[in-house]
Amino acid sequence: MTYDKLLASNEDQGTESIRLPNGLANSEKQTTFLHKRNHSRNLSTSSLKFKNTLKKKSIQHELYESPSRLQVFYTHLCYTILEVFGHIREFMRKWGLEQRKGAVDNNTEDFAPLFNSYESFHTRNVYVRNRDCFNRPICSVPGAEIELVERKSDDYNWTFYYTGEKIKVLNMGSYNYLGFAENNGPSSRCAIKSIEDFGVSSCSSRQELGTLRCHLELEELLARFIGVEAALVTGMGFATNALSIPAVIEKDCLILSDELNHVSLILGARLSGATIRVFKHNNVQDLESKLKKAIIDGHPLTRRPWKKIFIIVEGVYSMEGTITPLPEIIALKKKYKAYLYLDEAHSIGAVGPTGRGVVEHYGCDPRDVDVLMGTFSKSFGAAGGYVAGPQNLINHLKNSSHSHCYATSMSAPVCMQTKKTLEIIMGLDGTKEGQRRIKQLAENTRYFRDKLKKMGFVVYGNSGSPIVPAMLYMPPKVAFFNRLMLERKIAVVTVGFPATPLAGGRVRFCLSAAHTREMLDRALQAIDECGHLNGIKISKLNPPRTFQQVLEMENLQKNNSKFHK
């Protein structure tokens, strides 16, 4: 059964999705159901007015395919074998039968241990085996093509040495969504020129002598782009979340956090001192249930009402490629008088007809989101982050956020790179280059995701997301696929436990507007070959096909449609 037919049949039957599959990263629930999420359903009766308007929005289906029980069993068996052999090698190292090459605490026994050796068990016995697949140094701009520094190891990845050679590969792993990470063009020229005016660093925080003219211009332009009153930029995207959340949330507040939120959001929530409760990924029913319970029960110690209730979600989730059901979450936020914090790190610039993120993707009002956050290290090809919202919120953050008060301000070249890129996206440079790139990214995403599905790969995520995960499941396949792709001069990002559940190993493709159709076809051909060698074309929705068979099938369908016309 094809993807479209299965989706249509599910719609006819009114299938509703409640649970998430085993393959989702950081997911607590593991099921073996093939299911569909329809975000326009299951709203409470008090939200019927909003539900009627919701039908007009572009809320897309996200189809997931859980691994078979046999696949899960084999994956757990692999980790069990690795664990057993790891303990055997630990025993041999302890008694001097094998050389200990990992980190060793050199302090005497009367010192408290500097680190827990057992916590590094996975690193020493599993990660080191696959270390050649990670932390690869690069020596070029992270564009559509990239140059890697060749490195080799003579001791099974414990140490590496550099050969002095460079490997030019196709880049399918960087967050360069709109292709602005380049060393030529108006954005990079603007960044280079800014060094003559401002230097490389302000050597001060924004609250002291670190606020440059370009910072104020960028903040004004950014607020206009997003559609809010004001914005505040910082020099690091991770710190934007980690240090801004504690500035607006405090003790005796409640945070309802999506279970797949980024670690920067988790760290910020913990630093705030608030009570944290986790709801199932993109599950509006579970969120509403926890909201109701929180309002009815109040604080668990005092039984008094919470000072504030904050819902924290991401626009696009970087490991799944899923998109948050924003209209429904806004409806719940209004219904229960909660606040909403939206992280648009992977969606600003990359999602929406004009690149204004998930808010535009669904046609929502940005003023309905209390705190809008995003980063410049993806679509803008720069670094840093921002918080946007009402003017009183930004005024408060200027006096309370540690990222504004204590951290060194954003570098002028980074600021000018971001500002010029934003002008191009908005069309203020007098060209349509920004819109061309946004449209190209959307086309590349649809084309690439569609071909992977038709070849028989298990693909996760939303059709509008530039992040396309394909499931590998077993740990040997995670490393094997990565090495096979590099042999074919294609760089990919593969991820496994503990970044995912045990049976959630995957390869994560990141699409870019800089990718040409020829580049994507080259990548798909290589993925087809590696997928066959790896045995990962196991989708229940589409039978395994080669890339050439998929192209021939599509050409035949086009010819048939022309004949009928």
Image (spheres, grey):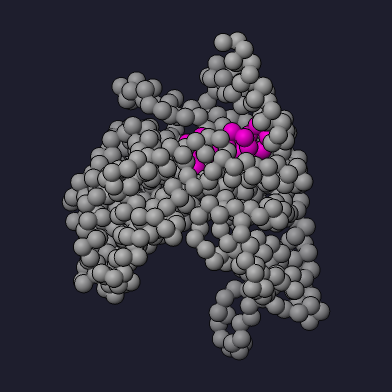
Is 553 situated above or below 276?
above
Q: Quadrant of the C terminus?
A: top right
Magenta-highlighted residues: 449-467
Q: Quadrant of the N terminus?
A: top right
Task: Specify the principal SS of the magenta part.
Answer: loop
- In the image, 447 versus 352, the foreground residue is 447
In the rendered structure, the answer to whether residue 525 lies left or right of residue 282 reads right
> Could you tell me residue 39's position as x and y percent?
45, 29
Q: Residue at x 41, y 50 (%)?
A: 379
Q: Residue at x 33, y 47 (%)?
A: 424
- In the image, 428 versus 207, the foreground residue is 428
- In the image, 274 versus 88, the foreground residue is 88
Q: From this viewpoint, is residue 498 visible?
A: yes
Residue 558 placement: quadrant: top right
Q: Residue furthest right?
A: 97
Q: Residue at x 61, y 86 (%)?
A: 106
- In the rendered image, residue 207 lying in the magenta stretch gets the answer no
> Could you tell me residue 31's position as x and y percent?
62, 37
Q: Residue at x 37, y 22 (%)?
A: 56
> Could you tell me residue 135's position as x and y percent?
59, 64
> Could you tell me residue 437's position as x and y percent?
42, 42
